[in-house]
Image (cartoon, rainbow, N blue to C red):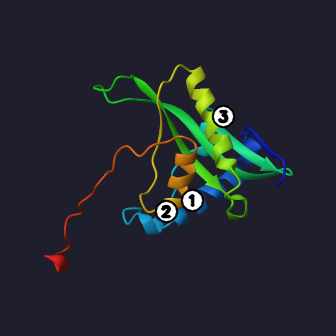
């Protein structure tokens, strides 16, 4: 395996990261019928890179950015035993680099960042159908917690 380096993202990474976001959305559209059609963005990646409260990481192999992820503190629900938690997102790895533990390396750095900020809980969301991602997250210690369910209003032709 190529030597993998994990580092903070910089503004110069933005073109590659925007491509990652596009690929991530393409991969998730078949799993989520509520994602609206057309071009869209999940994140303001440039703002995340500039924000001292968000950590955006990339993995490099031979000078090429091959993977990404971010961590951000978010307020917890008021009835939980913690006030804030670290939310991880923007987990994307180029297909030819999957299965090599790169995402796990990014998660470990993000967990360390979260714990250094005093956050006791790290969470992420993943589509139930995304079994490879679930397996990768479970390898890093994540456990399934909640299942969000949805019920769309029937259309006229379904009534």
Q: Residue furthest toward the bottom?
A: 157
**Quarter of the image where the C terminus is located:** bottom left
Q: Nearer the viewer, mark 1 or mark 3?
A: 3
Q: Is residue 101 left or right of residue 33?
A: right
Identify residue for label 1: 24
Residue 98 position, x and y percent, is 67, 59
The residue nearer to you, when weighing 107 against 9, is: 107
Q: Is residue 52 visible?
A: no
> How much space separates mark 2 and mark 1, taking CA atoms?
6 Å
Residue 130 position, x and y percent, is 48, 60
Q: Is residue 111 left or right of residue 38?
A: right
Residue 26 position (above or below residue 145): below
Q: Is residue 121 visible?
A: yes
Residue 64 position, x and y percent, is 81, 53
Bin the neighbour count of mark 2 within 10 Å (Cα to Cα): few under 14, some 14-19, many 20 and up: some
Q: What residue appears at the point 62 percent right and 53 percent down from the top-left corner?
A: 92
Between disc 1 and disc 3, whose residue precedes?
Answer: 1
Q: Circles 1 and 3: CB distance less than 8 Å?
A: no
Q: Which image quadrant for residue 36?
A: bottom left
Identify residue for label 3: 109
Identify residue for label 2: 28
Q: What residue appears at the point 40 percent right and 63 percent down from the top-left corner?
A: 32
> How much space separates mark 2 and mark 3, taking CA atoms?
25 Å
Q: Circles 2 and 1: CB distance less than 8 Å?
A: yes
> How much space separates mark 1 and mark 3, taking CA atoms?
21 Å
Q: Which image quadrant for residue 55?
A: top right
The residue nearer to you, when weighing 120 against 70, is: 120
Q: What residue appears at the point 62 percent right and 28 percent down from the top-left corner?
A: 112
């Amino acid at each position: 395996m190529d030597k993998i380096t994990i580092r903070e993202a910089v503004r110069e990474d933005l073109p590659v990261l925007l491509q990652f976001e596009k690929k991530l959305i393409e991969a998730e559209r078949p799993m989520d019928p509520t994602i609206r059609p057309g071009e869209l963005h999940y994140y303001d990646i440039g703002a995340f890179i500039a924000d001292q409260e968000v950590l955006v990481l990339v993995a490099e192999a031979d000078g090429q950015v091959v993977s990404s992820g971010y961590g951000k503190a978010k307020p917890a629900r008021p009835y939980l035993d913690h006030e804030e938690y670290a939310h991880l997102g923007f987990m994307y790895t180029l297909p030819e680099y999957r299965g090599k533990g790169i995402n796990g390396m990014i998660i470990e750095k993000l967990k360390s960042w979260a714990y250094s900020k005093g956050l006791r809980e790290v969470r992420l969301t993943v589509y139930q159908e995304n079994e490879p991602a679930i397996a990768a997250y479970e390898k890093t210690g994540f456990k399934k917690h909640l299942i969000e369910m949805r019920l769309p209003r029937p259309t006229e032709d379904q009534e």
